[in-house]
Amino acid sequence: MLENKNMNNLKSERLPYFPNVNSLMKISLGLIFFTILSTAFVYAETISVDVDGTSFDVQYTAVGMTVTGIESDTESVSLIFSVDVTDSTGILNVELERSFFDSIYDDTDDLFFILADGDEAISEEIQTTSQSRSLIITVPSGTEDLEIIGSVFNNSVEEPIVEEPIVEEPIVEEPIVEEPIVENIPNNECGPGTVLEDDICILDQRCGPGTILEDGACVLDSAPVTSSSSGNSKELIMSITVAFVIAGIIGIILALISRANRNKN
């Protein structure tokens, strides 16, 4: 009885020093995670990908899966891994150089978006430096394509296209300036009593009406005036005729008056 009691006391004294189940689970997960990381650093592989004619190397490690190929999609800014998951779950650890591929928004680091055959996959960024970013991705069994979506390839961040507003320039109508009409007044006219000869004003030596210039002197015009003299003589004859007719009429009237007076007497 005494020995059994001593054994029970000894067991009860040792039990507090044994870890509980939760502690054992944490230790196990930590060891698994450490093993994965250690394996990743030891067995890292490199695969090349072409981006717009430029080749880049991507460093990765795979546990429970294999990477059979890789390609880039510049339209969606993504890397597409062709994978073959051999275990129930695969683990992919990939290191991405910032100068090659990154995810940035408003000049700050943004999360990578990861799809496994179109479905969102579980991932975690485990290391971030100024030169690279490292991701650990859980890949479900049966996955064939694993896509990592970022925002920039080869330091060419896609900036939104900003359309510049079209500024319409106002139409300025130029005023129509009417040029004044300038009358050209000839300056080669001479004053009264002078005439222009060879652009020089000299005395007008021409003769007046009824005279002609002979040997530099004005003399009377001796040519007979036919039209004016004949016209004047005709008017004179007509006047005399009219006067005689009027005088004859008056004489006849007076004679008739005197005869009438005589008959009365």
Image (spheres, rainbow, N blue to C red):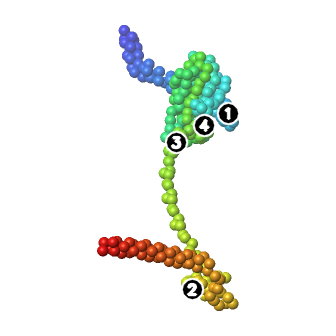
* Direction from residue 69 to residue 27 in the image, left or right: left
| x then y, percent, for residue 80 | 61, 27
Which residue is label 2 attached to?
A: 193
Residue 134, picture quadrant: top right
Residue at the image point whose x is 61% and y is 86% from the top: 211
Mark earlier in primary sequence (4, 3): 4
Looking at the image, is mark 1 or mark 2 earlier in the sequence?
Answer: 1
Number of marks: 4
Q: Is residue 212 visible?
A: no
* Separation of marks 2 and 4 at Cα, in angstroms: 104 Å
- Name which residue lies at 67% across and 30% down: 47
The CA distance from mark 4 to mark 1 is 11 Å
User: Which residue is identified by label 3?
Assistant: 163
User: In terms of sequence position, does the residue under pointer 3 or pointer 1 come before the other?
Assistant: 1
Towards the viewer: 41 or 108? 108
Closer to the camera in the image, 62 or 33: 62
State whether residue 40 is above or below residue 86: below
Q: Say which label, 4 or 1, has the lower sequence index.
A: 1
For marks 2 and 3, give the CA distance. 85 Å
4 and 1 marks in contact (CB < 8 Å): no
Q: For this view, does 248 lie left or right of residue 67?
A: left
| 155 is higher (above) or lower (below) than 22 | below
- Describe the element under mark 4 as helix, strand or loop: strand
- The residue that label 1 is drawn on is 50
Residue sitting at the far top: 1
Q: Nearer the viewer's eye, disc 3 or disc 1?
A: 3
Question: Disc 4 marks which residue?
Answer: 153
Estimate the spatial distance between the alpha carbons at disc 1 and disc 2, rounded to whole Å. 109 Å
